[in-house]
Image: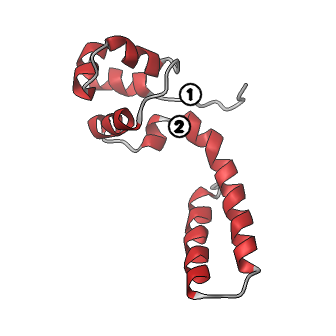
């Protein structure tokens, strides 16, 4: 069980804030059954990529704001793996491709580094 104070998703919060009912959001998402939206909000079902992009488009928010808890769970692992890959590449002979990868990984690492 996660000890993070974040909810896995904030779909219900943003739906309520928008004033939309589950039925209206279901319609906007192009879904047929309101139960899917309810299950997404309760973390009983994972939305498809199409539905995720729909949520992002409707609420004008990036996915990490809609799914903060998921982001908080996966970001540290990505940061650790990006650092490890960067160290591995840094130990290799430099080429244009390696330099490009290192520059990209440094951006990823910087964006994920915890702020103080």
- Let me know if residue 19 appears in the view: no
Please tell me which residue lies in front, 3 or 25: 25
Above or below 40: residue 116: below
- Mark 2–mark 1 CB contact (< 8 Å): yes
Q: Earlier in the sequence, mark 2 or mark 1?
A: 1
Please tell me which residue lies in front, 110 or 30: 30
In the rendered image, which quarter contains the N terminus? top right
Please tell me which residue lies in front, 40 or 72: 40
Residue 30 as seen in the image, left or right of residue 70: left
Label number found at residue 68: 2
Q: CA separation, marks 2 and 1? A: 7 Å
- Let me know if residue 25 appears in the view: yes
In the rendered image, which quarter contains the C terminus? bottom right
Above or below 1: residue 32: above
Picture coordinates of residue 57, whole percent (x, y): 29, 40
Picture coordinates of residue 115, whole percent (x, y): 63, 55
Above or below 112: residue 95: below
């Amino acid at each position: 069980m996660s000890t993070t104070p974040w909810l896995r998703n904030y779909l219900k919060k943003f739906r309520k804030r928008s004033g939309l009912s589950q039925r209206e959001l279901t319609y906007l998402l192009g879904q047929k059954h309101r139960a899917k939206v309810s299950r997404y909000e309760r973390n009983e079902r994972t939305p498809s990529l199409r539905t995720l992009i729909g949520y992002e488009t409707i609420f004008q928010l990036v996915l990490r704001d809609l799914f903060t808890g998921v982001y908080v769970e996966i970001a540290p692992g990505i940061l650790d793996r990006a650092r490890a890959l960067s160290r591995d590449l840094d130990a290799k002979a430099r080429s244009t491709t390696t330099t490009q990868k290192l520059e990209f990984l440094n951006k990823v690492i910087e964006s994920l580094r915890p702020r103080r």
